[in-house]
Image (spheres, rainbow, N blue to C red):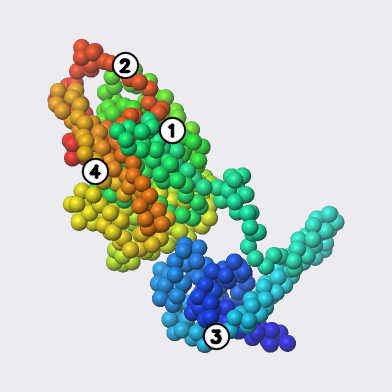
Amino acid sequence: MADVERTSREESERAVLGAAIHGGQDDKAHEHLRDLLPLDAFVVPAHVRLWQAICDLVDNGRPCDSASLCDELKVQGALEIVGGPAYLQSLYDAIPVILELDRHVEILVDAMRGRRWRAHQRLADAALQEGEPLSTVRRLDDEAAAMLCSPDKSQPRGACLEAVRTRGVTSPVRVEMGGRGQEDGRSTDLGHVIGALFPGQIALVAGPTGIGKTAALMSVALVNAMGGTPVGFIPLEESQEELEVREGSALSWVDQWRIQAHRYLPGQEERVARANELIRRLPLWFEWLPGGNSRDVASAVRDLIHRHKVKLVCIDYVQAIGGSESEYENIRSSIGAIERAMGRDCCCYLGSQVNREGAKSGSPEVHHMRGAGTLEERARKVIVLSKGNKEEHEIGDDGKQHLARREVRVAVKKNKGEEGEVYGWVHRQKGIFWPGYAPPPWVEPEATVEPEQRMMPDYNDPADRLPDDGVTF
């Protein structure tokens, strides 16, 4: 009898998987089945891996066909475990008619409930045998009974909205970044244009080398951390020390080179000290991964979620993630690893470079990203940075002109369409991007320093020299 039940269950698993992959009479079968069957509805190990890959495709809004599933399983290193493309094709013969599909789903759900009930009932029996209080035994028994009456489908309509409204585990992450209203007829409210990211979603921050991608990512991280959102930052090139200098420079509004050389103007040292104290209290953690591969990045994301409960992770940048495959395959596997590591616990701002054509054009588009097809397919939003029309210079302590800040155009695209644009400035010596034509709101107005009050530099000391203008942002 048990063998008959096992054979029936395995046939039902094959029927459901065949309908999800090959469609049958319902091209959207995989979306309907995703809501009906959790992972433990399957018992055969290969079927469990297959269903997990199908759920990943559905959750990320990607097509669920044989080709896409083969690619996803190959990225996860599980294609041969499930039997290869030949086994996926063999599931075509198992596709049931629509009425039979409902029956197969019912068989799997009933078997799943029975397994859950038996597992919880064993806990109740063990508690009784070990002399636990009867209240504990009764609670475990009630939980076992509830397993037999678990709902067939996902949360009722409105439950997810209520979870978001009450800022539960699915609360979105908003970036409250805005300049000083409308300036020159241009919007400066970047937070309004970007909107919110929900857990599990990725927003790309793309642009040519030196435009200010790291500055923009640091701004997003700082603003969210200052608002109380736990943030993780994973740089693959700049070290934690370099990024903390950027933080201190942005929060104190003192040039980075002055912090590094300890050559402060009057009052600046106290501002840097206050900024350092604020940095120590911020819920912002760094995981420096020079030369890290996709597994290292995924492990760092999981570690940040586990240890610090981060809700936002910034990764700078996807093309720097190491790997032995071609660039396209490496980007694809890296994003898949990041998505699986995030789960439904946090969202991600992911830096991305553009190709030579986009860098030369001066106005890059989404299709100019290196690995654009994969990146655009997997990202919820794309934020493209390009040069504006203005640059401002200032006289340094060496008496020469140096680039102080550069205008940057930020074009935000959502759902494969144009959403809006914002103009802001990358402040070169502060290492931060901010929308609008004024410094961030936490910057206090700086008192004018007369020329005779300036600390005169020693030109024989290299620490007193401003960095070359070629230094990237």
Query: Quadrant of residue 216 in the image?
Result: top left
Q: Could you say which quadrant of the image residue 127 lies in?
A: bottom right
Residue assigned mark 1: 279
Classify 155 as above or below 280. below
What is the CA distance from the residue labelled 1 to the residue labelled 4? 30 Å
Three-letter residue code for mark 2: Ala
> Hey, which quadrant is residue 67 in on the image?
bottom left
Q: Which comes before the other along the chain, label 1 or label 4?
A: 1
Q: Mark 2 points at which residue?
A: 447
Q: Is residue 282 left or right of residue 204?
A: right
Q: Which of marks 1 and 4 is in front?
A: 4
Of marks 3 and 4, the one in the foreground: 4
Q: Give the residue type that dot 3 points to.
A: Ala
Which secondary structure, mark 4?
strand
Please, which residue is most extreme toward the right here? Answer: 134
Label 2 Cα crowd, 10 Å radius (few <14 / some 14-19 / many 20+): few
| Residue 94, numbered circle | 3
Q: Is mark 1 on a helix, strand or loop?
A: helix
- Specify the amino acid type for callout 1: Ile
> In terms of depth relative to the viewer, which is nearer, 246 or 22?
22
**Label located before the other in sequence (1 or 2):** 1
Q: Which residue is drawn at 44% across and 77% down?
A: 66
Q: Which residue is labeled 4 in the image?
A: 387
> Disc number at residue 376?
none
Which comes before the other along the chain, label 2 or label 3?
A: 3
Q: Which residue is drawn at 40% across and 35% down?
A: 178
Q: Where is residue 448 in the image (x, y as percent from the top left)?
A: 28, 16
**Residue 177 seen in this snapshot:** yes
Q: Residues within 10 Å of mark 3 (few under 14, many from 20)?
A: some
